[in-house]
Amino acid sequence: MREPPPHPVPRASSARLLGLACGLLAAALHGGNWPAWRGPHGTGVSKESNLPLHWDPTHHVRWRAALPERGNSTPIVWGGRVFVTQAMTNGKRRTLMCFDRRDGRLLWQNGVDWSEPELTHETNPYCSASPVTDGQRVIASFGSAGLACYDFQGRALWHTQLGKQAHIWGNGASPILHGELCILNFGPGPRTFLVALNKKTGKIVWQVDEPGGRSGQDAAPGSAKEWVGSWATALMLPTRGSAELVMAFPGRVCAFDPRTGRELWTCQGLNALVYTSPLFAEGIVVAMGGFNGMSLAVRTGGRGDVTGTHRLWHHPRTRQRIGSGVIAAGRVYVVDEPGIAQCLELSTGRLLWEERLPATGANAASWSSLVLAGDRLYALNQNGDAFVLRAAREFELLAVNPLHETTMSSPAVSDGESFIRTHRGLWCIGEARPDSRR
């Protein structure tokens, strides 16, 4: 489908107001929006209770839309629309695509051109960051190609260049929204910073620099190579009183005042590589490292270096974790990169159970972040197997649902439907309709 031409109608036009009204009506009809990576609160937790338990490529598939190239980003959902980022023409075009959630029809696509080479890994295609929306605008991070904002009709509202990103494993942190701010972990690489922009104009409000990432190739002759960087997405805590913006950086997890970027507290205990985003529940933040990763839990509300006063537990070495977990009923659930599900006690970090998930194909590895809906956990592996587990003190596998397509993204859930992005297509899983299009 062709991209929409430049629209001459002023922003305050009746056409724009009509589009906004339609978007608000659709949102009212679809109350369970999934507006950002990891859902409405950034925690991977949903109030959904009517998602299908079993599916495969021929059962409980409402539709499947083909995608032009590989991609790892997770879709977001608002009202009757599904948005996903997509690299095209071998990464020379960074695109936001909008689909009709009823039938998977492509409504529009828009993006920016970027012809300069950008470092990444073959397993991490460009446009790995998921978009974010407030129901009026959609913002997407395109790495070195900048941060871009579009309205629900696909018209570009602003485009802000933040500079080049450079790490041999690429980037993938997603933007989040808080009030009038769009907040992004720009990194990893020599230039790493946490930045807040005005979501309506794209102008920078504040920026906090962080020691940059290293990716082995910049080591001096005779010295050991170092791999340093954070791919974490920032998390706003739903705390009473003053808000806290939590971020996991190499070596530490820390909190900032989202209005100013002022650091509030820091807790040491992470290793140099951080792939997962922080988790939060019951006044506790859990953060996990990547390769040979450390993990920790810290109580919120402190000031300064709280390592000695607020850190509840610390694990010096665990298996590699790329996908983020969830917290429920005093327990932490996570799936390690090798495809092993774990359950930890939130207050102590004690392991309650761990089980290898039974893959249907050769690749059992998992980069997917967990989603909790009701008392069920949903996870994906790279085969395209979707596992449904009971969120409980003892391991209980409820279903294994293969799609037979490679995926490194995470599920998005909304109003009884699961949206799964693979390297070949975008799937909508729900109670099957007679007119489902695949």
Image (cartoon, helix red, strand yellow):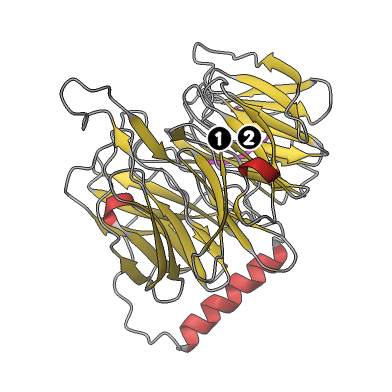
Secondary structure beneath dot 1 equals loop
Residue at horizontal 56%, vertical 21%?
317
Q: Nearer the viewer, residue 254 or 371?
A: 254
Mark toward the start of the polypeptide (2 vs 1):
1
Q: For the residues carrying marks 2 and 1, which lies nearer the camera in this image?
A: 1
Give the image quarter of residue 72. top left
Q: What residue sits right under mark 2 in the picture?
A: 296
Vertical position of residue 184 compared to residue 226: above or below: below
* 148 with respect to 432 (left or right): left
- Name the quarter where the N terminus is drawn: bottom left
Amino acid carrying mark 2 in the image:
Leu
Q: What residue sits right under mark 1 in the picture?
A: 269
Give the residues drawn in magenta, as a range: 57-64
- Name the quarter where the C terminus is drawn: top right
* 133 with respect to 190 (left or right): right
Vertical position of residue 377 compared to residue 203: above or below: above
Q: Position of residue 10 (x, y in %)?
A: 38, 87
Tell me, yes or no, whether the highlighted magenta stretch contains residue 234: no
Amino acid carrying mark 1 in the image:
Gly
* Furthest residue toward top: 362
Q: Are marks 2 and 1 in contact (CB under 8 Å)?
A: yes
* Furthest residue toward front: 308
Residue at horizontal 28%, vertical 45%?
190
